[in-house]
């Protein structure tokens, strides 16, 4: 099972996607604790999310932890899964109402162009997370180091079987 989580044959350039996605998740998670009324509990309550205090803290912790894992390229596929759920939830709860006529958090905004504008970062983060789930961490990652060590096995003394 662990082998499937860390296995990757993706090129080193995947590090750019990991850095982008991981840095944004890390930043957003930290900001949830720095600005709770604007970005965490207050925003969650305004959007109608139940238990806004608890879920905002949980969301912030997951964004920080998964952001760090993605930046390091450690358990990248595992870290991508909660972030896919996170982005799907954010799009559903805060962005789709814009498309449907501006109800809720973004009252007054409506239509395709407002939706496209407001959801661009969430969609990019969702696509980046799906990409990382699909291809793995890439050559320049801790997953690749673990993969190499697991496939080579422990060093044996000369003449040992």
Image (cartoon, rainbow, N blue to C red):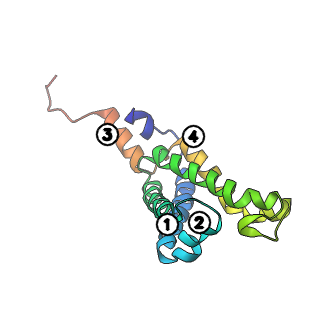
Q: Which residue is mark 4?
A: 134
Point out the frontmost of discs 4 and 1: 1
Q: Which corner quadrant of the image does residue 119 belong to?
A: bottom right
Query: Which residue lies at the image location 44% right of the left edge and 39% below the top edge?
Result: 5
First in sequence, mark 4 or 1: give its number.
1
First in sequence, mark 3 or 4: give its number.
4
Q: Contact, CB < 8 Å: mark 2 with mark 1?
A: yes
10 Å crowding of disc 4: few (<14), some (14-19), many (20+) = some
Q: Contact, CB < 8 Å: mark 4 with mark 1?
A: no
What kind of element bears circle 2?
helix
Q: Which corner quadrant of the image does residue 133 belong to?
A: top right
Point out the frontmost of discs 3 and 2: 2
Q: Nearer the viewer, residue 35 or 70?
A: 35
Q: CA distance from mark 4 to mark 1?
A: 33 Å
Q: CA distance from mark 2 to mark 1?
A: 8 Å
10 Å crowding of disc 2: few (<14), some (14-19), many (20+) = many
Q: Quadrant of the C terminus?
A: top left
Q: CA distance from mark 2 to mark 4?
A: 30 Å
Query: Which residue lies at the image location 84% right of the left edge and 64% below the top edge?
Result: 110
Question: Where in the figure is residue 99, as x and y percent of width and height?
Answer: 81, 58
Q: CA distance from mark 3 to mark 4?
A: 22 Å
Q: Which residue is mark 1?
A: 53
10 Å crowding of disc 1: few (<14), some (14-19), many (20+) = some
Question: Where in the figure is residue 67, as x and y percent of width and height?
Answer: 48, 59
Q: Which residue is mark 2?
A: 44
Q: Which residue is mark 3?
A: 149
Asked whether, in this view, residue 102 is left or right of residue 126, the answer is right
First in sequence, mark 2 or 4: give its number.
2
- Residue furthest to the top in view is 161
């Amino acid at each position: 099972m662990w082998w499937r989580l860390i296995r990757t044959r993706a090129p080193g350039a995947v590090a750019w996607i990991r850095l982008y996605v991981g840095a944004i998740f890390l930043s957003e998670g930290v900001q949830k604790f720095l600005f709770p009324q604007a970005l965490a509990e207050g925003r969650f309550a305004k959007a109608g999310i139940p238990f806004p205090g608890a879920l905002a803290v949980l969301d912030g912790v997951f964004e920080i932890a998964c952001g760090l894992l993605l930046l390091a390229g450690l358990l990248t596929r595992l870290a991508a899964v909660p972030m896919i759920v996170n982005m799907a939830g954010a799009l559903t709860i805060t962005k789709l109402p814009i498309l449907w006529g501006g109800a809720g958090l973004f009252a007054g905004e409506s239509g395709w162009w407002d939706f496209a504008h407001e959801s661009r970062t969430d969609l990019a983060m969702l696509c980046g997370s799906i990409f990382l789930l699909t291809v793995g961490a890439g050559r320049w990652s801790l997953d690749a180091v673990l993969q190499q060590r697991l496939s080579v096995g422990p060093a044996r003394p000369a003449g040992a079987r």
